[in-house]
Amino acid sequence: MALGRWATGHSRIVEIGVAEGVSALAFRQAMSTDGTLFLIDPFHLSRVPTLNFTKWTAHRAVVSCDRGRVVWIEQFSGDAIRTWNNPIDLLLIDGDHTEEGVCRDWSEWSRFIVPGGIVIFHDARVFEGGWTNPNYGPVRLVNDLFRQQMIPGWKIVEEVHSLVVLERLK
């Protein structure tokens, strides 16, 4: 799996948008044994907060592996960033999929990515048999910033299924 491959050896991983925890588990299984995985998700979509099955499923998946340390941040990414001050080796942006939401996550969190660090956008490319389209928020942001403008200091290093992987140049 691409997520696990990119997480290998990284020690400071942040995931925005955890959902059921599938990608978080992939990160945890591959990350550095002394690393920390920060999982940011408010788990706000449950109609009955005490029976939040998405949150329960995510926690259950992530604790099935004991590699490294996990920090759960049950906030929206825009709230979590207010007190953030840690460098990040790998960031997965998979929260608010509106163009504005993805842009906000990118602009607020990308400054913490270390040189040589990785940012992965989920649902950020159109691919055969896929569910995204050219007007999808992450697709529009990636196309604008990294295909048309080609903002300096960043390079697309892989595209697989709906994922677009960027590296911050050293």
Image (cartoon, rainbow, N blue to C red):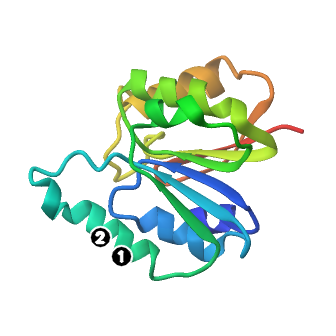
Is 99 placed above or below 24 here? above
Q: CA distance from mark 1 to mark 2?
A: 5 Å
Q: Nearer the viewer, residue 50 or 135?
A: 50
In percent of width and height, residue 169 lies at 84, 37
Q: Is disc 1 surrounded by few (<14), some (14 to 19) or many (20+) residues within 10 Å?
A: some
**Residue with the mark numbered 1:** 60
Give the structural element (helix, strand or loop) at label 2. helix
Question: For the view shown, which residue lies furthest in the right direction?
Answer: 170
Is 74 placed above or below 107 here? below
In percent of width and height, residue 22 lies at 41, 67
Amino acid type at circle 2 is Thr
- Quadrant of the drawing holding the N terminus: bottom right
The numbered disc on residue 57 is 2
Identify the image quadrant of residue 49.
bottom left
Give the structural element (helix, strand or loop) at label 1. helix
Identify the image quadrant of residue 99.
top left
From where the camera sits, is residue 67 visible? yes
